[in-house]
Image (spheres, rainbow, N blue to C red):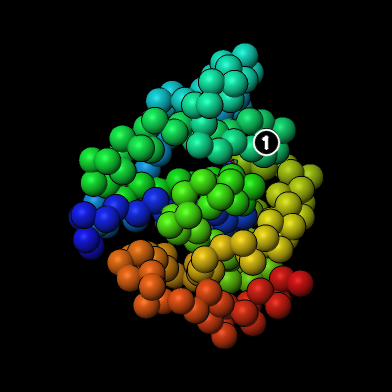
Amino acid sequence: MNNNTPHLVVISAPSGTGKTTLVRALLASNSNMVASVSYTTRTKRANELDGEDYNFVTNDVFESMIANGDLLEYAKVFGNHYGTPKKDVNEQLSSGHNVILEIDWQGAIQVKQKVADCLLLFILPPSKNELMSRLQKRGTDSNEQIKMRFDEALNDIKQFEHFDRVFVNQDINVTVNEILAYIEKPNLNKTRLPEDVLSIIKGFQ
Ligand code: 5GP
């Protein structure tokens, strides 16, 4: 990877796609990648660390960050506010790192408007059935929550057209390698929707 031109890489995926595991694998891939830590008004989960998984803040703090222009993008997801700190991302890019933003599609669109040469990646689960089974396997959500996340995911999938490249996460190692190859030479990989990805998208419609 060319260290002189670090990339801002936005990764969006509906829940149940394996996005968190995927981002961890990318960070561990020795490709000079770091992840931005977002700010959120959501309540911290038991297994999360403040400053590491998210910066957990109050609504007042979040609103003042918006007013001060501190956020590169922000959006409301599942009733909570999330935003990307502009200064941290600029510092990470200036120090030569590729920076990953793991954010929702609304935020991805805002980032593209501000940073024209960022890369917007969208990750899909392999099928509707696999999406449902992944959501059920988590074991932490009620049936009602699973149904809500499933419907939300189907809705999110409709947003694929805003992205530079769509990947299907069937096998994590394969997907990581595909993403790394794309980031290394985005201009050579202009096909946004390879045939196999297109047919998978049709299966969700
Ligand atoms: P969770 O609360 O489950 O960690 O995340 C819920 C959703 O918020 C996910 O789709 C995640 O990608 C998105 N998200 C996390 N951080 C940000 C952010 O800074 N900006 C935006 N727009 N979405 C975010």
Spot occupied by residue 200 in the image (x, y as percentages of width and height):
63, 77
| Residue farthest to the bottom, as pictured | 195
Query: Residue 96 vs residue 138: left or right?
Result: left
Looking at the rendered image, the quarter that the C terminus falls into is: bottom right
Residue at x 56% of width, y 63% of height: 163
Residue at x 45% of width, y 46% of height: 101
Spot occupied by residue 56 in the image (x, y as percentages of width and height):
51, 23
Query: Residue 154 vs residue 165: left or right?
Result: right
Query: Residue 198 vs residue 25: left or right?
Result: right
* Corner quadrant of residue 130: bottom right
Q: How many marks?
A: 1
* Corner quadrant of residue 195: bottom right
Residue at x 44% of width, y 33% of height: 86
Spot occupied by residue 55 in the image (x, y as percentages of width and height):
47, 25
Q: Is residue 18 visible?
A: no
Looking at the rendered image, the quarter that the N terminus falls into is: bottom left
Residue at x 62% of width, y 62% of height: 162
Vertical position of residue 30 compared to residue 203: above or below: above
Disc 1 marks a residue whose amino acid type is Lys
Q: Residues within 10 Å of mark 1 (few under 14, many from 20)?
A: some
Q: Quadrant of ligand 1?
A: top right
Residue nearer the viewer, 85 or 43: 85
Q: Please name the residue that numbered disc 1 is placed on.
A: 76
Spot occupied by residue 54 in the image (x, y as percentages of width and height):
47, 30
Label 1: state its secondary structure. strand
Residue nearer the viewer, 122 or 128: 122
